[in-house]
Image (tube, rainbow, N blue to C red):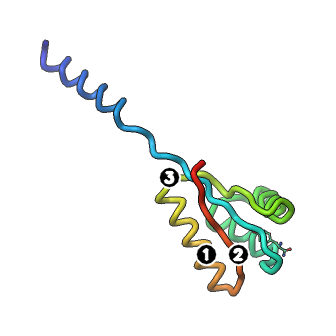
């Protein structure tokens, strides 16, 4: 077998072994105290939503108890959760954020 072909075969085999990372959903949970505008701001700041998208997700959380902010790799999801919790705490709000396998 020519050297070029062997390399190609190895590369192809390697590709099929590496699995894509499991996606994780980041969820916001409802509470009775965090102001709606603050939640909309969080969705814009940390999840790059526009005002309309953020308002829709906030209202879903408010009426249904929870809502998805986005789906990310495990590491990115964990960082988003930390950032949201730290920001809510800094601002004196009890907003809760969590993640689960998608
Ligand atoms: N329920 C809150 C209120 O009435 C609003 C709210 C929405 C809080 C979404 C948290 O994740 C949340 N002020």
Mark-to-mark CA distance, 1 and 2: 7 Å
* Image quarter of residue 11: top left
28 above or below 72?
below
Which type of secondary structure does the marked residue at label 1 adopt?
A: helix
Residue at 25 percent across and 21 percent down: it is 9
Quadrant in which the N terminus is drawn: top left
Is disc 2 surrounded by few (<14), some (14 to 19) or many (20+) residues within 10 Å?
Answer: many
Location of residue 51 with respect to 1 vertically, above or below? below
Q: Vertical placement of 36 versus 73: above or below?
A: below
Quarter-wise, where is residue 14 in the image?
top left
Q: Is mark 2 within 8 Å of ligand 1?
A: yes
Left or right: 15 in relation to 28: left
Please state the quadrant of the image where ligand 1 appears.
bottom right
Query: As drawn, is 46 to the left or to the right of 1?
Result: right
Residue depicted at 78% across the width and 74% down the height: 31
Task: Note whether ligand 1 is within 8 Å of mark 3.
Answer: no
| Sequence-earlier tag: 3 or 2 | 3
x and y, in percent, of residue 78 in the image: 52, 64
The numbered mark at residue 73 is 3
């Amino acid at each position: 077998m020519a050297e070029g072909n062997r390399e190609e075969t190895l590369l192809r085999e390697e590709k099929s072994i590496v699995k894509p990372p499991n996606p994780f959903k980041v969820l916001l949970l409802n509470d009775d105290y965090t102001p709606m505008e603050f939640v909309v701001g969080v969705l814009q700041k940390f999840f790059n939503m526009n005002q309309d998208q953020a308002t829709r997700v906030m209202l879903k959380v408010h009426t249904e108890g929870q809502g998805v902010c986005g789906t990310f790799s495990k590491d990115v999801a964990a960082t988003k959760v930390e950032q949201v919790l730290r920001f809510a705490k800094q601002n004196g709000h009890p907003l809760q954020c969590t993640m689960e396998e998608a």
